Image (tube, helix red, strand yellow):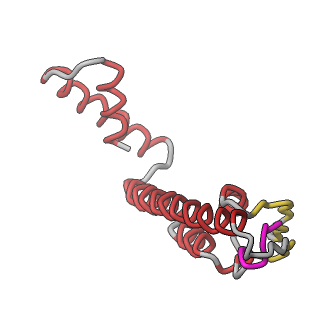
Amino acid sequence: MYIIFFLIWVIFNGHLTVEIALLGLVVSGAMYAFICRFMDYRPGKDLVIARKIFCFLHYIGVLLKEIIKANYIVIKKVASARYEIEPAVVRFRVDLKSSFARILLANSITLTPGTITVSLEGDEYVVHCLDKELAGEIDRSVFVTLLKRLERME
């Protein structure tokens, strides 16, 4: 948080000089001390936030990889006469604790070509898949694994 305060100080000043940097370090330190004292903030939360950010960035990378992979599969199925497309509707439950993780999973499924999250009620998902092959083991996907790891970091 201290680094974020300092970066905001530099951005709002528009340029960086030695005087601005030194004053920014002092002001950032004072603000950090204030939030630690009066807003129930602990320096350990910075480490948790940093780990969550890296885990979330890893999730975004995996999502992009899965989108590209699914694009290839869908194009191959649609463009080829050899494959007979068999749409499927899949219901499954995932034991994610936070609503943020459940919604992120639903949106990740929808962003992946060939699948659309039709409904999300509690921890039950209804997903329409372009083909049964795309449904696979959607309830044990890499998305679920990463989201569970993200939830354990609290």
Picture mark count:
0
Q: Residue at x 78, y 67 (%)?
A: 130
Residue 46 in the image, given as x and y percentages of width and height? 39, 54
Q: Residue at x 58, y 74 (%)?
A: 142
- Answer with left or right where residue 105 lies relative to residue 44: right
- Answer with left or right where residue 13 lies relative to residue 91: left
Is 132 a magenta residue?
yes
Residue 27 in the image, given as x and y percentages of width and height? 29, 28
Residue 7 in the image, given as x and y percentages of width and height? 32, 33
Residue 94 seen by the camera: no
Is 99 a magenta residue?
no
Residue 139 in which image quadrant: bottom right
Residue 91 in the image, given as x and y percentages of width and height? 85, 75
Residue 87 in which image quadrant: bottom right
Q: Quadrant of the N terminus?
A: top left
Q: Is residue 149 above or below residue 21?
A: below
The magenta stretch is: 128-134
Q: Residue at x 74, y 70 (%)?
A: 81
Residue 77 seen by the camera: yes
- Answer with left or right where residue 42 lies relative to residue 154: left
